[in-house]
Image (tube, coloured by chain):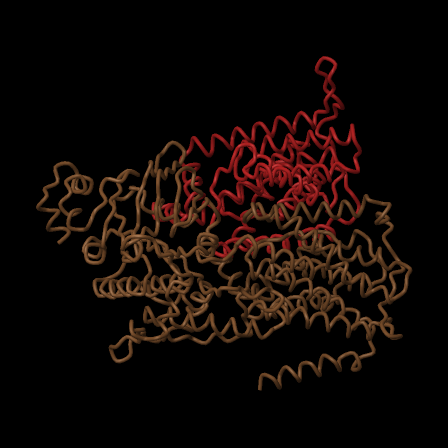
Chain colours: A brown, B red
């Protein structure tokens, strides 16, 4: 059915130019297609990666000028290399803007890219030797190939539509691949994406690069269609138009921007009836389309099926991965844990760790060891520096002082995804799931193979990419079964109850096949039954050889599972011992209950 | 000129602080202020009354703008609001084209005096008015925000509108007041500009870009910052035009914007409101 619909659409698209002889209409459609390409390209940055670019007219302009300058008054055969060059120059500009843009977020990025677009326009105006300033460049030839010339709008239409279909294919492939999941992770929760092993920097640059290359192609198509370009074409208004196409069509979807482009291009034509007022209605129309179509046109067309969240238990029994199941091996640490001397080698060694926020010393000269294969708990009153510690170890905060050795290897102060690659996974105290993704996709973000397949193979659908995807899915399935969430795999993660969202984060961390997992207050907000289940999972992690470091307030929970406990207070270590000894440690008691705390009360509290 | 940028930047920052929205149609409020003054003076009202009526009209428009266009979008990504304001600005600009026509218009000067002399420095009364009015608006602004109960409530709403709501503040009204205030200040900028320049429908865009730069230089959300930034950018513009070339004055302004974004993203005075998530 779906195949048939696609085929039908292709036939209609191919037949279209023969159905009309109205040149104006075909020119309009061609413009619409070029704008659609531009909108799809902007969607890579905005919809997929969640970044903002208000300089898109700049890339469009660079592409158009590159093509125009190279082919001007020349043969139509020059079009093909010029077309590719347009992509290259725009792509280089995209890198130039993308790399500094990594430091900017939100509104700043909006202004930075806006400034970039303006600069390109000013350069086009004033670099007269090359761009001829306001005179513009004319006599741009029509493309030609094998003696065939794309010299009419009818013929040009086919060129445009092929490029559009290729670009859409690229967008679709990106969205359903691991790159699409990475982009979504970056968009939804950048910090969690980093600690889950997503190379945030590389993905942002990739988004800017793809987007600017495609915009450059669109520019080249535009130049050869119109045959004359001048700087007036590439103003902020183009950016605004393309932006509204993306928003009105449906941000983050593959086909939305195309619908948005159709809407924006067609609307003024339908309004031509009142010549004077059409710009007024156009402006108002854009505003109202955004106001009344919150999900975009695509959202309006898609019926939202009410999703029923299945129960995770079947007849009161959880569908869980037992420790004897062979597929549990998929979750054992990916890289062999090095065998140190002694029975329990040190997995994580911290020494002299210090962290200051302004004048406040959050962690002062802390040294501690976590032994391999144990469950180690980190406890302390609120404000003791526990979360700061986790953030430092996982690379979310940069380490100012102190050394960290992980599995016998000295770890530099580096980006979170590099630390994740070493084999340290974590969960967050406040939920940071990738809320626009399904449970399965959330976990898949964590999955990674030993030798990741590169971007080109994924886009071309090479065999290696398919094999990789299959193996990633197997790991994700094991991780979901591990915490008993396999039955809800297709549900949107934000539809799950609190406990299950926490478990999704744990599964996501497990899917990274870490050597060590950091759990930041995993039991917070859970009821006693749920805590019991959590205890079982932690013991199962220990059983498959994962070292667990757990930060927690729930003392009965900690006492039950921890092999050893470190107590922090005001950023200092006050005790480091086995649970029984901690229970009787007077300093720990006074930290929790104040100096007058009665030891007996504590005994009752922790029992 | 710097003072005008500062005023428009201030109007822009007010909305940003109160709601996190970037208003790309702020320039159109300036344009409308100028045109309103033109229309009202044509009615032979006393000049001061004309000013009051124009400013009030644009302020009122700011309130309506908030009710119709901002409020429905307040919980969505700021991008949607950006597009709505761009749509609004296209709409208003063309409406103005229909009402007032494409030819630049001239508003009668403030006084019949041509120049005022201070020793051997000559200033036009309009320029003195701009500096004076900017200073007065800033002073009033400061008094309103830091020495009245309404100001405290406005600031509370800006920091955390949900908590403000729990404390019995009506955020909707607060945001409405802010938009009206912002509209009025932009309108005033237009009124001040009108006598020194010819007014046309495209004047808003040029002013807005410079106001953006002023906002970034000063530090997003910082009110003293935007004043310094505005005056700074006005000076840079004039100095470039005099010593380098007026062709490149826009390019240099934007280059400064980009340098600031990359090297000092927090601006001169730092960000007053933390980045919203």
Q: From the viewer's perspective, tell me whether residue A202 is left or right of residue B150.
A: right
- x, y (%) of residue A390? 36, 48
In this view, B79 is above or below A295: above
The quarter in which the N terminus of chain A is drawn is bottom right
Residue A364 visible? The answer is yes
The residue drawn where x is 35% and y is 40% is: A351
- Tell me residue A97's x, y (percent): 65, 49
Extreme residue in the front direction: A341
Most foreground residue, A209 or A187: A209
Q: In which quarter of the image is residue A158?
A: bottom right
In depth, the one of B106 and A305 nearer the eye is A305
Query: Where does residue B24 sit, x and y in percent of width and height?
Result: 62, 48
Nearer-the-camera pick, A108 or A580: A580
Q: Is residue A478 above or below residue A392?
A: below
Give the camera-side residue of A449 and A529: A449
Residue in the picture at 77% in, 55% down: A233
Visible in this render: residue B53? no
Q: For the C terminus of chain A, which image quadrant?
A: bottom left
């Amino acid at each position: 059915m779906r195949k048939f619909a696609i085929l039908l659409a292709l036939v209609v698209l191919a037949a279209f130019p023969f159905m009309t002889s109205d040149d104006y209409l075909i020119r309009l459609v061609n413009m619409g297609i070029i704008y659609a390409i531009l909108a799809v390209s902007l969607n890579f940055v905005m919809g997929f990666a969640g970044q903002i670019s208000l300089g898109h007219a700049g890339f469009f302009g660079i592409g158009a000028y590159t093509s125009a300058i190279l082919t001007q008054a020349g043969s139509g055969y020059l079009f093909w290399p010029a077309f590719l060059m347009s992509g290259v120059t725009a792509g280089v500009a995209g890198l130039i803007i993308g790399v500094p843009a990594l430091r900017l977020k939100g509104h700043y990025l909006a202004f930075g890219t806006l400034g970039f677009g303006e600069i390109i326009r000013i350069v086009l105006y004033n670099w007269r030797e090359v761009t001829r300033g306001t005179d513009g460049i004319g006599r741009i030839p029509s493309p030609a190939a094998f003696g065939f010339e794309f010299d009419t709008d009818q013929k040009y239409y086919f060129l445009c539509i092929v490029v559009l279909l290729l670009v859409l294919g690229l967008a679709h492939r990106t969205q359903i691949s691991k790159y699409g999941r990475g982009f979504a992770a970056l968009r939804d929760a950048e910090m969690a994406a980093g600690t889950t092993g997503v190379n945030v920097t590389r993905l942002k640059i990739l988004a800017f690069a793809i987007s600017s290359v495609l915009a450059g192609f669109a520019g080249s198509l535009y130049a050869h269609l119109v045959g004359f370009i001048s700087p007036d074409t590439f103003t902020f208004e183009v950016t605004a138009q393309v932006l509204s196409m993306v928003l009105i069509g449906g941000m983050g979807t593959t086909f939305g921007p195309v619908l948005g482009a159709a809407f924006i291009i067609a609307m003024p034509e339908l309004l031509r009836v009142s010549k004077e007022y059409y710009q007024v209605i156009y402006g108002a129309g854009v505003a109202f389309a955004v106001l009344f179509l919150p999900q975009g046109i695509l959202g309006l067309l898609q019926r939202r099926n009410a999703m029923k969240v299945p129960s995770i238990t079947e007849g009161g029994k959880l569908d869980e991965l037992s420790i004897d199941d062979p597929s549990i091996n998929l979750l054992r640490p990916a890289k062999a844990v090095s065998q140190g001397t002694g029975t329990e080698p040190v997995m994580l060694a911290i020494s002299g760790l210090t962290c200051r926020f302004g004048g406040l010393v959050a962690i002062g000269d802390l040294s501690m060891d976590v032994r391999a294969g144990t469950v180690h708990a980190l406890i302390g009153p609120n404000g003791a520096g526990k979360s700061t510690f986790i953030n430092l170890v996982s690379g979310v905060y940069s380490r100012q002082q102190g050394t960290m050795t992980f599995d016998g290897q000295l770890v530099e102060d580096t980006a979170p995804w590099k630390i994740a690659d070493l084999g340290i996974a974590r969960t967050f105290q406040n939920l940071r799931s990738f809320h626009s993704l399904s449970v399965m996709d959330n976990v898949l973000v964590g999955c990674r193979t030993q030798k990741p397949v590169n971007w080109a193979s994924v886009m071309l659908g090479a065999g290696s990419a398919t094999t990789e995807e299959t193996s990633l899915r197997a790991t994700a399935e094991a991780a979901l079964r591990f915490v008993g969430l396999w039955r809800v795999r297709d549900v949107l993660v934000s539809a799950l109850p609190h406990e299950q969202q926490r478990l999704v984060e744990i599964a996501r961390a497990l899917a990274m096949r870490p050597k060590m997992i950091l759990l930041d207050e995993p039991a917070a907000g859970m009821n006693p039954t749920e805590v019991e289940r959590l205890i079982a999972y932690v013991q199962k992690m220990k059983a498959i050889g994962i070292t667990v470091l757990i930060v927690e307030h729930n003392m009965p929970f900690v006492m039950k599972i921890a092999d050893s406990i470190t107590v922090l207070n005001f950023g200092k270590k006050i005790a480091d011992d086995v649970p029984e000894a901690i229970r009787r440690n007077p300093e720990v008691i006074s930290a929790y209950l104040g100096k007058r705390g009665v030891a007996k009360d504590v005994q009752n509290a922790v029992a | 000129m710097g003072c005008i940028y500062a005023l428009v930047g201030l109007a822009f920052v007010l909305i940003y602080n109160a709601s996190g929205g970037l208003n790309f149609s702020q320039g159109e409020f300036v344009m409308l202020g100028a045109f309103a003054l033109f229309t009202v003076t044509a009615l032979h009202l006393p000049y001061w009354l004309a000013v009051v009526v124009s400013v009030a009209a644009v302020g009122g428009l700011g309130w309506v703008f908030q009710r119709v266009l901002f409020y429905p979008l307040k919980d969505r990504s700021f991008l949607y609001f950006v597009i709505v304001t761009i749509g609004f600005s296209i709409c208003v600009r063309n409406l103005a084209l229909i009402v007032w026509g494409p030819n630049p218009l001239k508003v009668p000067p403030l006084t019949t005096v041509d120049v005022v002399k201070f020793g051997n420095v000559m200033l036009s009364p309009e320029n003195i008015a701009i500096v004076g009015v900017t200073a007065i608006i800033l002073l009033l602004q400061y008094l309103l925000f830091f020495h009245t109960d309404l100001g405290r409530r406005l600031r509370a709403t800006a920091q955390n509108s949900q908590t403000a709501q729990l404390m019995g503040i009506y955020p909707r009204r607060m945001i409405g007041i802010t938009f009206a205030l912002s509209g009025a200040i932009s309108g005033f900028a237009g009124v001040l500009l009108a006598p020194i320049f010819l007014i046309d429908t495209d004047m808003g865009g040029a002013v807005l870009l410079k106001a953006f730069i002023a906002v970034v230089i000063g530090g997003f959300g910082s009110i003293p910052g935007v004043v310094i930034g505005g005056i700074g950018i006005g000076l840079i513009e004039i100095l470039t035009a005099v010593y380098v070339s007026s062709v490149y004055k826009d390019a240099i302004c934007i280059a400064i914007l980009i340098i600031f974004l990359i090297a000092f993203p927090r601006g001169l005075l730092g960000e007053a409101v933390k980045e919203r998530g």
